[in-house]
Image (cartoon, grey):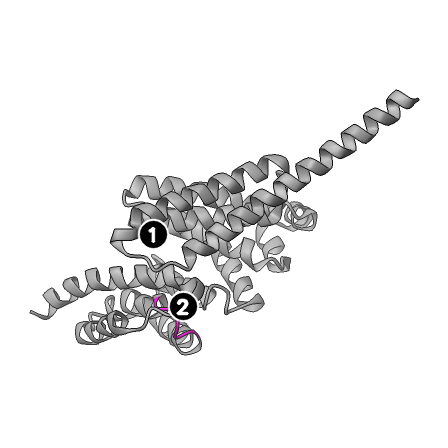
């Protein structure tokens, strides 16, 4: 009896130690991720920031080994893989592979909720999405999934529409917009604007204008909102003078402070590249 009790106590203590180690890894990853997001991106800082992003992912994946259903860790891995692909990877094939990983982690976060699994089984994925309330897990599912499709080019966009991916993606971001339009400084507004700008069969630039105007007005501190307006409204409509003016506005804008710095710095780099392209159109 004494041996059984001793074994039970030892097992409990081991479990507590493992939980403490997991919590420490998650805290380290959260802190380092915030540090990266709160550092202005520049080409000179690229390598150092990329190394830190890889460490963020390593910490989260070590924590996940202790609890494979930790929704926070799964969601932040999806977020981290998106940032790694979007900001730091340059090769299209590698970007797609990273977004595939990000989508897998995000969908695991959704299905770590038993209610989501039960409703998906009973009524399908879209019904489960419409009843789900974790905006972060939904958003990073969409972000990785949509970017993966977009990077595949027009054939990928058409194939996704025929598979019905567009309906699933629209349901996800529609739910995000209901839950929190301000997530990631207007992320659902940007995402839906890109959806209507890129859809192979039903583009709607009035909706693009409406969504991105709202994003720019409500979250002016986030420069990607203005960059999206150039990419998904002015440029498709060949409004080159207006595009040039807004790109110059982005380049002249303050970087801001806090967790907008990484993306704002990267938006400025992208704006400078786009400005060269736009100026050629004006020549």
Q: In this view, does 234 lie to the left or right of 40?
A: left
Q: Distance between the residues labelled 1 and 2?
A: 18 Å
Q: Is residue 221 magenta?
A: yes
Dot label at residue 87: 1
Residue 190: give x, y in percent of width and height.
41, 65
Q: In this view, does 147 lie above or below 40?
A: above
> Can the viewer see residue 145 in this picture?
no
Residue 41: give x, y in percent of width and height.
32, 57
Considering the whole magenta stretch, tell me its main secondary structure. Answer: loop
| Total tally of numbered discs in the picture | 2
Span highlighted in magenta in the image: 219-223
Dot label at residue 73: none
Give SS at disc 2.
loop
Q: Is residue 44 left or right of residue 51?
A: left
Residue visible at 59% across and 34% down in the picture: 65
Quarter of the N terminus within the rendering: top right
Residue 124: give x, y in percent of width and height.
61, 49
Depth check, front residue: 255 or 179: 255
Residue annotated with mark 2: 257
Label 1: how many Cα within 10 Å (few below 14, some 14–19, many 20+): some
């Amino acid at each position: 009896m004494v041996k059984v009790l001793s074994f039970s106590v030892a097992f409990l203590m081991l479990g507590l130690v493992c939980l403490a180690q997991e919590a420490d890894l998650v805290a380290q990853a959260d802190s380092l991720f915030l540090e990266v997001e709160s550092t202005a991106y520049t080409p000179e800082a690229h390598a150092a920031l990329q190394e830190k992003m890889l460490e963020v992912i390593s910490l989260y994946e070590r924590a996940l080994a202790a609890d494979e259903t930790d929704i926070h860790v799964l969601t932040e891995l999806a977020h981290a893989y998106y940032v790694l692909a979007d900001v730091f990877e340059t090769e299209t094939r590698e970007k797609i592979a990273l977004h595939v990983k990000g989508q897998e982690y995000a969908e695991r976060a959704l299905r770590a909720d038993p209610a989501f699994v039960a409703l998906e089984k009973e009524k399908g994925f879209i019904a489960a999405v419409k009843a789900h309330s974790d905006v972060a897990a939904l958003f990073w599912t969409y972000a990785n999934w949509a970017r993966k499709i977009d990077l595949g080019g027009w054939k990928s966009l058409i194939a996704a529409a025929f598979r019905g991916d567009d309906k699933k993606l629209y349901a996800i971001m529609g739910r995000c917009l209901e839950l929190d339009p301000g997530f990631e400084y207007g992320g659902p507004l940007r995402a839906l604007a890109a959806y209507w700008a890129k859809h192979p069969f039903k583009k709607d630039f009035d909706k693009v204008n409406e969504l991105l105007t709202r994003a720019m007005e409500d979250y002016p501190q986030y420069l990607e909102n203005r960059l999206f307006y150039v990419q998904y409204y002015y440029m498709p409509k060949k409004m080159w003078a207006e595009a040039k003016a807004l790109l110059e506005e982005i380049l002249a804008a303050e970087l801001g402070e806090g967790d907008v710095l990484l993306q704002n710095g990267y938006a400025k780099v992208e704006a400078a590249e786009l400005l060269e392209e736009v100026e050629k159109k004006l020549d």
